[in-house]
Amino acid sequence: MTRLGLQLGTLILCGIVPLDTMGQSGESTSAPDTQSESEQPDEQNPNDSKADKSSEKTFQEVVKNTEKIEGLFTFYQNSDENKAIIEIEPDQFNTEYIYSQKLDRATGERGLYGTTMAVDYYIVRWRKLGSRVRLVRKNVRFRATEGSPSARAITNSFSDSVIGSGKILSLPNPEGGGVLVDLNEILFTQGFSEVTEQLKKSYETGYKFEKEDSKIVLLKSFPRNSELGLLTQFRAQELKKPSITLPNTKSLDLYLRISLATLPEGPYMPRLGDDRIGHFYDMHMDFSSDKTETPYVRYVRRWKLEKKDPDVSLSEPKEPIVFWLENSIPLEYREWIRNGALMWNPAFERIGFKDAIVVKQQPDDADWDPADIRYNTIRWFVSYDAAFAIGPSHSNPYTGQQLSADISLAESAVRLGARRRYETSIHPVRDLQELKATLEATDATGSSRTGYCFTGPAMLHAASLGLDVLSARPGWDAEDEQRFVKQFLQWLVAHEVGHTLALRHNFRASTINSLDELNVGTQETSAISASVMDYLPPMVSLPGERQGDYYQEAIGEYDHWAIEYAYQPLAGAKRPEDERPQLREIASRISDPSLTYATDEDSGLGARVLDPRNNLYDLSSEPLKWFDRQFQLSAELLSNVETKLLQEGDSYQILRRAVSSIWQPYFLAAHIAMKYIGGIYHNRDHVGSSNGRVPYQPVPAEQQRNALEFLRTKIWSASAFEIPPDLLSKLQFGRFRDFEDSQFKTKRLDYPLHDIVLG
């Protein structure tokens, strides 16, 4: 998947905090302008002519025949005339606002999916320049103590960016001094260059933004936020890669949702990050002093949690973290999704918060919509090619305080395995090539850097293989399938909610158990992994073994530790720096085997990721032995796939799909085995680690030799990829035409076994 229309728009998101509030918390503030907005003189725009009398119209003349919408910002709208005006009051020129954008409706393919929250987010302010008003994105990456010489140096060194600008339409409002500005001009004149860039990547087709056919179709305003809905039209100059979902690729609409909001009231203490634990951070460079070892400051992106009763060991929070289930979620999945979100409450209970997370259901007749920034939502969307879940969120970049989150679940995440009986793998070779590209670019997806995460098709391939094996066994029934899908969906939601709580991926968490410990299956909520933040395949038993949980139904010990670091109340601190001794004590437990941690940039393929313990889609501290189990499951499926999965009248494409699912374990195992040979174990320990570990340790020679033997016998062996000839002759893809005309595009009719093996 591309980085999406998730980077959409010159209008994306932002978080803010007033400068005087920053002083209460003790952290460095943003660098102020040399002159405040109120002190800066209005400069005459050289493009403005004195003959232009529009700004001399009275306030009432301009707003005549419009609907007034009051709230944080006051809007005046006349939909028939496509007129949308914003009133900016004098004190709003000196205030910073959150500017957040969502892609609420899109094309449903190639990275452009509705219900998705944009990754980036902005701090904006209104700036008056002569007869025009600019919407300016503030540069918050570089800071110094307010009023210091360094702050003045930063102002002179780094520029802000202009998002859009509009002409002042009238004389000031006689009742408050506010000025009217054309909102269409502010939002539409920039042409959405980043949107058109994304469209070109998705469709290899040049698109032009059509200002005249775009419109602000929604304006709502509340005391602390204003909501804008933009229907934006784009037209193609030429066609190179036609759309599958659009009736006509030459023309498309995107519905963008923008929120302008203030920061939550009240003081907030930022929490400094530690690289031994995987959290998302808001990061800046602080030049207040040259005596620090680094100018970088990193604040954990976390929700503000305070006890109602600080004197008791377990108290409800003053304001819990509330997630709303969108009313588009199918009824049969709502309880499972709720359970997945609530899996995190035990971690908060351990540090003194009862019911820190609350899940509510959006009524069918709700008078609010999920794109409103005031609501954290879990949303459901349908697309042509999406098979993932994502959990982005927005925070205040000054402090790291989490502000809003929207989790999106593709229906394909549930429509897996037996629920995709007739979905044919037309291009099994291409599937493996896409998996390889994913592993090679693990940290290029944006998940590590921005809080954006997607769990994609590889997870469904692993689930599909497990479900095919299980459903081909005697006694498998609908109740068993329901338990499998329930555990999968609960884990998936817990994973994405974990991202919104600040947790990054932990791709070493699956190594806490030996293979024997995994196979026991003596408890229903066994700790399959130290964290739900790993990409976990299902734990499927071999014939004769007792089947335990497929996916764990409780968070792991690492998850408890990460929540403790981010949310544990630490008394007595007046500045973030005052918490360092206690935070370092928490983080120092990294040498505990149950708290092992490695993330995106530590995992995948390539010279940078030589630690064979850091992998996606594996289980146990002995991944090669675990993949050997997967090979046994694949062999089991091959031996009975025809007799157990097919019924009279079924299409042979069921066989093709099932057989295609067996290749992922071979592909992953081959690459993991190569990481052992010449591999290096990497630890994130700091000086003084309790067990004396150093950052780099060579993989023991015996394990390297074992990996080479694994490759020789399991991958390079002449018998490694044997498929019965009579089965190979039945691996037909579907004969019905599909939207992509795959029957014409495939290079061969027979199954490409040799290409798969060579790959």
Image (cartoon, rainbow, N blue to C red):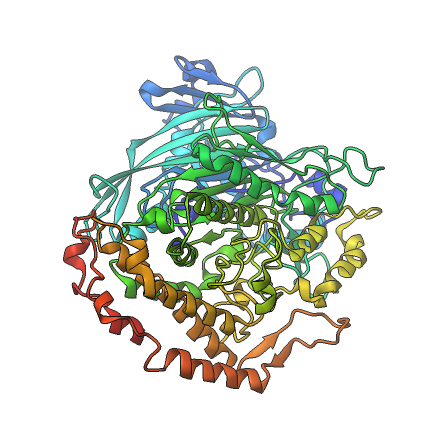
Residue 95 image point, x, y percent: 60, 35
Name the image quarter holding residue 632. bottom left
Nearest the camera: 486 or 187? 486
Q: Residue at point 70% right, 65% down?
A: 590
Residue 81 image point, x, y percent: 32, 20
Name the image quarter holding residue 728. bottom left
Residue 49 image point, x, y percent: 38, 31
With respect to residue 177, does 723 lie above or below?
Answer: below
With respect to residue 575, does 677 lie above or below?
Answer: below
How many tags in the picture?
A: 0
Nearest the camera: 441 or 231? 441
Residue 324 image point, x, y percent: 54, 33
Q: Residue at point 39% right, 39% down?
A: 381
Q: Is residue 44 visible?
A: no
Q: Quadrant of the N terminus?
A: bottom left
- Judge left or right: residue 129 versus residue 568: left
Q: Quadrant of the C terminus?
A: bottom left
Name the image quarter holding residue 679. bottom right
- Judge left or right: residue 613 versus residue 732: right
Q: Is residue 612 visible?
A: yes
Nearest the camera: 696 or 94? 696
Q: Residue at point 59% right, 68% down?
A: 516
- Judge left or right: residue 206 versus residue 665: left
Nearest the camera: 82 or 226? 226
